[in-house]
Image (cartoon, rainbow, N blue to C red):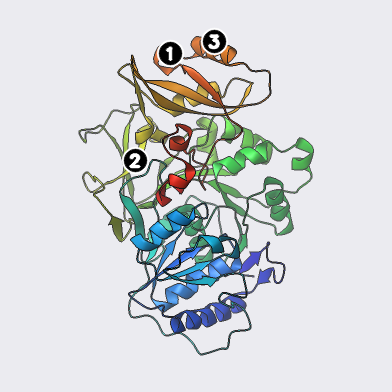
């Protein structure tokens, strides 16, 4: 079995032969509609059999493919289409109202769009395109910026080979893909599973109990997801966790945002030492990996560099900082992207790409990410990383979730604001501020508490701090902000 589309009511399991037939037919259909080298196709949809087949089919036409975010507004979709000269947009039915009139729109899953299955006539094999298709993945980040996207001609096979040395996935295994395929993290593991001839169990929405049920039903050995899903799995009632057999799972891999608090320890205590934390960028693919052993020693670590990857933590002048000191994280990898699609420069140093993150390297050579460089709040002349404050605030039993931002202040320049999801109705603002005074240094203490039902997050679980701070609304965010 090549694909298990658990949300497709008509045909769940797709063989490799079925997938080959359908992608060939779809490629011919796209060629007839103008997809060819020199043109650009957009793809807007959730994880599905049709989505996976479209990726292969567009590649066979030689057209470039841009992956759009499912959290986009109509204005954001139109902006991406214009920025990347998209002439054909293939989308799920639920996103029909988001598509601009300026492009040819074709449907993944409705009769008005491309008929993906047996209603299309066979029109022969597709010849290899004159030039390789570029896959354009919009870069990760929650602060916005000049970079539009990063283009890959192929999956970085060097990175795949390096990963297999430390990652317990296997040829012909079963991978549950519970991370969005429009993001580099989900896309890379879709490609990895394809290279390994693994069965891909595709999930549109990562419901925690459903993940456990699918792991048992299909004897899944690898689960690809994001840290916020780990929290939802840990928070399931104990009787729910015990209801399912998780023994086939050898690896639960997460990326996309830092693992908060002692979540890694909690998860491994509940589900076994199968957790792997990977840190990477759209530009450089996989950069570091933390094994279960690493996470037992340091639950926050992003791990050690992958083979062929160089990681440095530099100060503002480009100098390497001492071990244990914070600085800006730079990466150089053999698997870097083929090109940037940018409005500006990336500020590379010594041939290394800036990730936009603040971090440090410990004496064991492990990287820890402290937060985004743009998230740093300067209060009273001191630089404060919000994640450091959040880690302490999460220790309070009355807090279910929290994020910290800055707001302007006439005395200190900026002060910290704690956006709190309360665990119950008992916690008062005064109690929390008093608790913070006893547990945080002067510059790390929030001066204001704002209660919120749920933190706004992007597709990989990163908190949208600009939305929390009131700088923008979700509809005003750039497409890159949603990644």
Find residue 235 and report its horizontal and vertical position in percent: 68, 36
Q: Residue furthest front?
A: 101
Q: What residue is disc 1 on?
A: 441
- Residue found 33% across the figure and 58% down from its top: 337
**Foreground residue among 310 and 464:** 464
- Residue found 76% across the figure and 36% down from its top: 238
Q: In which quarter of the image is the N terminus?
A: bottom right
With respect to residue 27, does 141 lie above or below?
A: above
Q: What element carries label 3?
A: helix
Residue 199 is left or right of residue 89, and the answer is right
Circles 1 and 3: CB distance less than 8 Å?
no
* Residue 287 visible (yes or no): no
Q: How far, Cα to Cα, is label 1 from label 3?
A: 12 Å
Q: What element carries label 2?
A: strand
- Depth check, mark 3 against mark 2: the one in front is 3
Residue 219 is left or right of residue 417, and the answer is right
Q: How far, Cα to Cα, is label 3 from label 2?
A: 33 Å
* Residue 195 visible (yes or no): yes
Q: Hey, which quadrant is residue 119 in on the image?
A: bottom right
Please tell me which of labels 1 and 3 falls first in the chain.
3
Q: Hey, which quadrant is residue 366 in on the image?
A: top left
Residue 52 is left or right of residue 111, and the answer is left
Find residue 471 and report its horizontal and vertical position in percent: 41, 35
Q: What residue is disc 2 on?
A: 356
Please tell me which of labels 3 and 2 falls first in the chain.
2
**Foreground residue among 209 and 406:** 406
With respect to residue 207, does 13 lie above or below?
A: below
- Residue found 53% across the figure and 77% down from its top: 23
Q: Which mark is residue 434?
A: 3
Q: How far, Cα to Cα, is label 2 from label 1?
A: 26 Å
Q: What element carries label 1?
A: loop
Q: Residues within 10 Å of mark 2 (few under 14, many from 20)?
A: some
């Amino acid at each position: 079995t090549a694909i298990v589309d658990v949300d497709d009511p008509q045909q769940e399991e797709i063989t490799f032969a079925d997938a080959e037939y359908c992608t060939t037919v779809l490629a011919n259909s796209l060629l007839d509609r103008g997809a060819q080298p020199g043109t650009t196709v957009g793809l807007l949809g959730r994880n599905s059999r049709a989505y996976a087949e479209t990726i292969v089919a567009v590649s066979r036409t030689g057209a470039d493919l841009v992956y759009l975010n499912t959290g986009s507004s109509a204005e954001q979709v139109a902006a991406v289409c214009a920025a990347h000269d998209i002439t054909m947009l293939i989308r799920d039915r639920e996103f029909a109202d988001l598509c601009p009139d300026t492009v040819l729109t074709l449907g993944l899953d409705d009769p008005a769009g491309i008929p993906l299955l047996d209603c299309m006539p066979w029109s022969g094999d597709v010849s290899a395109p004159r030039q390789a298709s570029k896959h354009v993945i919009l870069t990760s980040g929650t602060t916005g910026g000049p970079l539009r996207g990063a283009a890959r001609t192929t999956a970085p096979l060097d990175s795949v080979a390096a990963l297999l040395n430390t990652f317990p996935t296997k040829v012909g295994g079963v991978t549950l893909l519970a991370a969005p395929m429009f993001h580099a993290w989900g896309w890379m593991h879709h490609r990895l599973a394809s290279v390994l001839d693994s069965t891909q169990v595709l999930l549109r929405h990562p419901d925690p109990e459903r993940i456990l049920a699918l792991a048992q039903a299909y004897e899944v050995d690898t689960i690809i997801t994001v840290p916020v899903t780990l929290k939802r799995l840990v928070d399931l009632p104990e009787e729910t966790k015990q209801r399912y057999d998780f023994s086939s799972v050898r690896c639960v891999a997460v990326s996309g945002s830092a693992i908060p608090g002692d979540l890694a320890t909690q998860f491994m205590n509940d589900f076994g030492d199968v957790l792997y934390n990977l840190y990477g960028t759209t530009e450089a693919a996989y950069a570091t990996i933390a094994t279960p052993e690493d996470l037992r020693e340091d639950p926050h670590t992003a791990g050690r560099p992958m083979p062929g990857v160089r990681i440095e933590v530099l100060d503002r002048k480009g100098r390497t900082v001492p071990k244990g000191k914070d600085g800006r994280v730079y990466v150089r990898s053999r698997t870097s992207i083929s090109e940037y699609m940018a409005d500006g420069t990336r500020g590379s140093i010594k041939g290394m790409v800036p990730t936009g993150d603040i971090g440090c390297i410990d004496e064991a050579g492990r990287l820890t990410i402290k937060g985004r460089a743009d998230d740093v709040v300067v209060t009273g002349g001191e630089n404060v990383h919000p994640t450091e404050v959040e880690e302490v605030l999460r220790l309070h039993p009355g807090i279910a979730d929290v994020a910290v931002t800055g707001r302007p202040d006439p005395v200190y320049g900026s002060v910290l604001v704690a956006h709190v999801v309360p665990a119950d109705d008992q916690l008062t603002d005064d109690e929390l501020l008093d608790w913070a005074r006893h547990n945080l240094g002067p510059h790390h203490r929030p001066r204001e508490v704002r209660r919120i039902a749920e933190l706004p997050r992007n597709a990989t679980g990163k908190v949208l701090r600009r939305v929390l701070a009131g700088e923008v609304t979700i509809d005003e965010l750039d497409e890159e902000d949603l990644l």
